[in-house]
Image: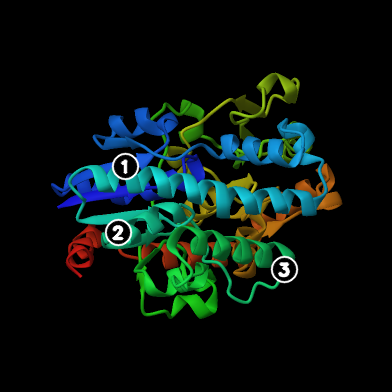
Amino acid sequence: MDLLFSSLPSHGHLYPVLPLAVAAREKGHRVTFATAAAFHPTLTRLGLDVLDVGMTIPEAFEQVATREGVPTDPGAAREQDPEVIAKLASAVFTDVLVRRFYSDLLAHLGDGPRPDLVVWEAAAFGAGLAAKAAGVPQVCHSFGRAPDPEDDTSMGAAFRASFSTTVVDLMGPDSGSDVQDILETTPYLDIYPPSIQVPSFAGRANRIPLRPVAFAEPGELPDWVVAHEQPLVYLTLGTAFGHAGVLRTAIEGLAATGARVLVAAGPTVDPAELGDPPPSVTIEAWVPQADLLPHVDLVVHHGGSGTSLGAAAAGVPQLFLPQGADQFVNADAVCSSGAGRQLTGEGVTAAAITEAARTLLSDEGVAAAVKALAEDVAALPAPADVVDRLVGFAKS
């Protein structure tokens, strides 16, 4: 079978989809991955064919910010009014990226042999619309928690309205589709644990459970990570929301616990900005997170879906320091299960981080909740098992 996968070109959107794509290739299917060229080296190393489709999220933000007269520098943009940031995000994810992925992928689908099935990552709506326009069967692959249809926040309303406008513009006034219509009618591969999924979504007939599998570029872990005697805490703010000030505060708070701390500064923070750490703290620009998680005792992080689900699957308690996007949603979901805690805004202090980390490392109730969440993840079907269902979707 000829499968075409597509996702937004970012670690948080692409990495959750790779386990299924690799499993399909290993079962003998031809797999082509359509995304921007920045991630093509990773994809080709995995044995996947590639198509240059779409644009990066930073490129889309720069385009919208320039159009709106807003600073494009990430540091300056972070200081913008929340309503301005929400407006930018809405334009990026429901308009600019949708249109670009739609036009690029539709051109490919019209030029050559069509795939038997398009598997599109849940934020790559343009790929799903292109498949629909071309008449190719499609499946949506989630990267995190499903959108809540009862979300009445201003951002939720803005996203829905902007997306509906884009769909009508691309597909015609009779398309009758919005975000919820698409998610209700398209087979939906759901990698979010059912115990913390949106309750109204967990029982949908079109939902296909799929176990989240952590993915990272291969790398070496220090010997002391595997053989550590003290509790080991992993600190990261991910690949897109790094903030030196937050990391410095977290390092100070975590060092006071007496634990060993491993910090991944990420691509947006220069490790030199974090100063000279205490002897118990090791700072790296990058670590192979998927390999690291089974060895740690606590993860302190921003709340990206990949890290949240990876830590949940590994049976590790989590301290959330959410910075934006869907991170508050993931923090709320995991914390509602008792498997984590979160600190936000002015509550992110070194003392608060020390206290929360100590509780998460020692509380028996937290440990029980963490174990239950890990069992919930483990009970979901593995990617290799779900591949066989794709054949049926291609023929439908």
Label 1 vs label 2, nearer the camera? 1
Q: CA distance from mark 2 to mark 3?
A: 35 Å
Residue drawn 28% across and 35% down?
A: 46
Closer to the camera in the image, 25 or 371: 25
In the rendered structure, the answer to whether residue 369 lies left or right of residue 396 reads right
Q: In the image as oriented, which residue stretches furthest toward the right?
A: 346
Secondary element under disc 2, as helix, strand or loop, is: loop
At label 3, the amino acid type is: Thr
Q: Position of residue 69 (x, y in %)?
A: 77, 38
In what element is the residue under mark 3?
loop
N-term-proximal mark, 2 vs 3:
3
Q: Which residue is mark 3?
A: 153
Indicate the quadrant containing the C terminus: top left, top right, bottom left or bottom right: bottom left
Distance in Å between CA atoms under marks 1 and 2: 20 Å
Pointer 2 residue: 382
Mark 2 residue type: Ala
Rate crowding at label 3 as few (under 14), some (14 to 19) or many (20 or more) other CA atoms within 10 Å: few
Nearer the N terminus, badge 1 or badge 2? 1
